[in-house]
Amino acid sequence: MNPGLLYAALAYTAWGLFPVYFKQLVGVNAFEVVMHRMVWSFVFLMVVLMVLKRWAWLRDVSRQPRVLLAFGLSALLLSANWSVYVWAVQNAHMLDASLGYFILPLVNVAMGFVFLHERPRPAQWLAVAVAASGVLWLTVQSGRLPWVALVLAVTFGTYGLLRKVAKLGALEGLTLETLLLLPVAVTLLGWWTWHGQGALVQANPVTLGWLLLAGPLTAIPLLLFAAGARRIPLATLGLLQYISPSLQMLLGVWLYGEPFEPARAIGFYMIWAALVIYSAEGLWLMRRWSPIK
């Protein structure tokens, strides 16, 4: 078995089980959870860099203002994505969150067309159109845009676009993003603590322990993902990514009892049909162009 398959599957499984973790922090404001996630992720990543002795890139990046600006923007997108995701989990919108990550691959196709001048194939355009119809159906039947799903898909899609053209790897990039937002996170946490607010003052030891775990729980799946992505084809990686939203949806319906009405299910079925078209076309091309041994 290719170890890359195991690494990538473990990463997506961890991300799919994240709602169980964030449910333990339901008494902490979602934005505050994100600030803790930034701080403790940075601490954990510093330890990893210390063990690996990978510091040279920091000196080089500090002399490149354009790189700092690009990663500052990606850090803001990441924090916005995290904030909406944590809020969705804490407020019984887990199905909307899973929908966002089901839509994400198709958002990536559209962004590649608009910003990278990529030319999607006809089957990819069909998948995007079917998914858009599913979003339209969900909007009509509920009377409102599925804003949680759209915000998650667009913010992470844009974040992925920025990281695609970035010069740093996964470990270095996440470290720089957390470093750039660290002053904001520390300032806000300090302000809340000074005024007798926030988890550092009001939470019990168990909740504080869960917050401290945010560091390794954020960084380890990312490192597994990076290790897997280097060892398996992109098409395989694209199929494995559906593990995460599938687990989120199952947790939302079966463990946390979120409603999944038949009318709403039709929108999900349309988006799943779009993913089947997208994935089948990718697999067909991969087999067509694979060398004959």
Image: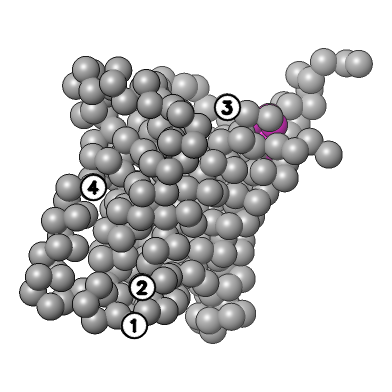
Rendered view: 266 above or below 109? below
Q: Amino acid at mark 1?
A: Asn
The residue segment tinted magenta is 232-236
Q: Which residue is mark 4?
A: 182
* Circle 4 SS class: helix
| Mark earlier in primary sequence (2, 4) | 4
Q: Residues within 10 Å of mark 2 (few under 14, many from 20)?
A: some
Q: Quadrant of the N terminus?
A: top right
Q: Which residue has dot 3 on it?
A: 121
Q: Is residue 233 one of those drawn in magenta? A: yes
Disc 2 marks a residue whose amino acid type is Leu
Q: Relative to 63, is 74 on the left or the right?
A: right
Calculate the distance from the C-alpha at mark 2 to the C-alpha at mark 3: 49 Å
Image position of 137 (left or right of 34): right
Q: Identify residue for label 2.
A: 208
Name the quadrant of the C terminus: top right
Q: Is residue 196 visible?
A: yes
Please give left or right for residue 55 compared with residue 62 in the image.
right
Disc 3 is placed on an element classified as: loop
Vertical placement of 227 versus 100: above or below? above
In the picture of the structure, the residue carrying the numbered disc 1 is: 204
Tell me if residue 27 comes above or below residue 71 in the rendering: below
Of label 3 and label 4, which has the lower sequence position?
A: 3
